[in-house]
Amino acid sequence: MGQQEGRVPVTRRTLFRGAIAAPAVGAAIPLIGASSAEASGPRSGDFDAVSPRFAIAVLPDTQYLFDADSADPEPLRATFRYLVSERDDANIAFMTHLGDVTEHGTDGEIALASTTFRLIDDKVPYSVLAGNHDINSSTDDQRGNTPYLAAFGPKRFKGQSTFGGSSPDGYNSYHVITAGGRKWLILALDWRASDKGLAWAQGVLDAHPRLPVVLTTHDLVAADDDGQAELSDNGKRLWDKLIRSNDQIFLTLNGHYWPPGRTVLTNDAGHPVYAHITNYQDRYYGGAGMIRLYSFDLVRNRIDVETFSPWFLDTDPEKRSRLGAETIELTGDVDRFSLDLDFGRRFAGFDGVKAPAARPASAMQPKGTVAYWRFDQAGLSAAGRDGKSLPAGTVARDLTGQGNDLSATILPNSGADVLTWSDQHHPDQPAHASLRFDGGQSPNRGAVLQTGAEAPINSLKFESGYTIEAYLKLPDPFVGEHAWMGILSWEGRAGDAGKTNGYSEDEAPCSLNLSGERFLQYAVYPSVQNSQPTSWSHALPVGRWTHVAIVNDGKRTIIYVDGSPIARNPSQASTGIATLGKPFALGGTQSAETFGQGYYGWLGDVRIVARALKPKEFMTPAG
């Protein structure tokens, strides 16, 4: 129903400590619309508003903890003590309650809940909204005064620095938080927002057109037993009247139903909206104050989600009940997962920060550049739209003018869409275009772009060093059989270059490939040594652009992924490349001078320089 989202392979107590302790690339992210003093200013209490890693805590239906004479607020007190004590380590920016604070909304229940919430008043900023059990469920936000409104209306939040205001009826509110070096808007809507309430919400969005928005309410999506969520009747109304037309809303959170679940919706701008339901009142001890932490990481472009009960966690293990021990942390696919989200790209349409402009080809050719290919050039960009098929014989010019033009070959067993033009690109890529390859093992298919028989690059030995750079992206989901697919290579047989060294003589002299575990493999037969030093990366992410740089200084090779050196770079000597005068290729690697499967994914700009570049000289903007 929605796009796939990966599991979080971490333990609960260490998730944020590990993240916050790690230094971030570009340590300070400037506030949008803020002065430099604001962006780099001191921490506010125990929360670091500048760090690119922060968390939003989500607290769903607590109603069974405030149920007439069977009330027991202690689990929620433990949750609030946790939020206060761990705010520094987890860098918790905010907490949002999703409604149904109490079971009946009586004066006594509301009073006890209000007293319990005082534990975080002035300590952790938060929002609360009314669920159907907090008020008369047959009414909307025009219902007038209630015990809930008296306790959790705008008067309670006027002292909070994050509080932006409430609708005239008092049942809808918004907060503006500063986290990750920028501002975010939290919009809390009543269980049944009236047309007046939705008009007020639209006014809030119109008044803050540059802020990404997390929308919270009580009833929006419901899930089946497999965790697949769909809009409820009320959710359809909110979607049609507010969410779908406001691109700022990228995440919605609601309670009310169980089991938990999630889906990804597509708004009118064609962008994803992550819709999540979280509710644990059906679990042991009414959910025991279970919370979720949404850990935003603006460096890794990721949100990590975990769900746990601080009350059970802090209970002496010797005194924990059996059910308490089983419910400390929930680790199913709907309770512990990750979202890969390119924040810059997702927010580019409204946040006032312009995406980097395309850079001219002439500015991307440092001294020693021997070939440069990009796919916004005439004849390719004329394809006109993302997904337009490119036929055999399509030419990508070498923009250095040195004659290393590439021509497309379509491998057998390939359909018409095995090679397509795309407007997708890495945010930092010089050209705002790429080629999409649909290669695979079963059946063997693919497309390869090759230099001509007389291209100078076919015979270059690079004995003084070289740098090979490429932007690439793997599809998400990464489906099919693609182990050992080639990304780029020089054609020929290593044996014909006199390179044996115990390896197959049918291997290509030089190739960049991807293993079955999605590890990059750079294998080269040097022109001088009779060896095959091979570099291995970590597993590449899917659905995200990656910049790869292969740097050889005439002595050894170091591979960089997104500007960072990988661990498995061999120390053995490697001088030059044992080229054989045969074509250079993008999109495949030969064995015994035959292409089998082709590359599966996107390729952006590719550049080859006949010297070792420093990271500051790479095609990234810092270069």
Image (spheres, rainbow, N blue to C red):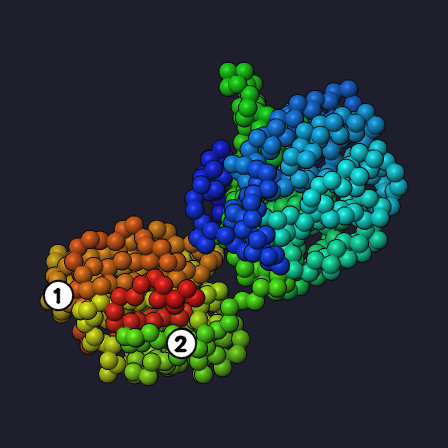
Q: Which residue is mark 2?
A: 363
Question: Which x, y percent locates residue 226?
Answer: 58, 42
| 621 in relation to 478, above or below | below
Other residues around mark 1 within 10 Å, as few (<14) / some (14–19) / many (≥20): some
Question: Which x, y percent locates residue 487?
Answer: 33, 65
Residue 570 seen in the figure: yes
Q: Residue furthest right?
A: 144
Q: Nearer the viewer, residue 399 or 88?
A: 88
How many numbered markers are drawn?
2
Label 1: element kind? loop
Residue at left 45%, top 83%? 378
| Image quarter of the C terminus | bottom left
Question: Which x, y percent locates residue 507?
Answer: 20, 63
| 267 in relation to 14, above or below | below
Q: Which residue is mark 1?
A: 528
Residue 514 seen in the figure: no
| 539 in relation to 619, above or below | above
Residue at left 63%, top 55%? 212
Residue at left 82%, top 37%? 149
Mark earlier in primary sequence (2, 1): 2
Mark toward the viewer: 2 or 1? 2
Q: Is residue 516 left or right of residue 428?
A: left
Q: Which mark is residue 204?
A: none
At label 1, the amino acid type is: Val
Other residues around mark 2 within 10 Å, as few (<14) / some (14–19) / many (≥20): few
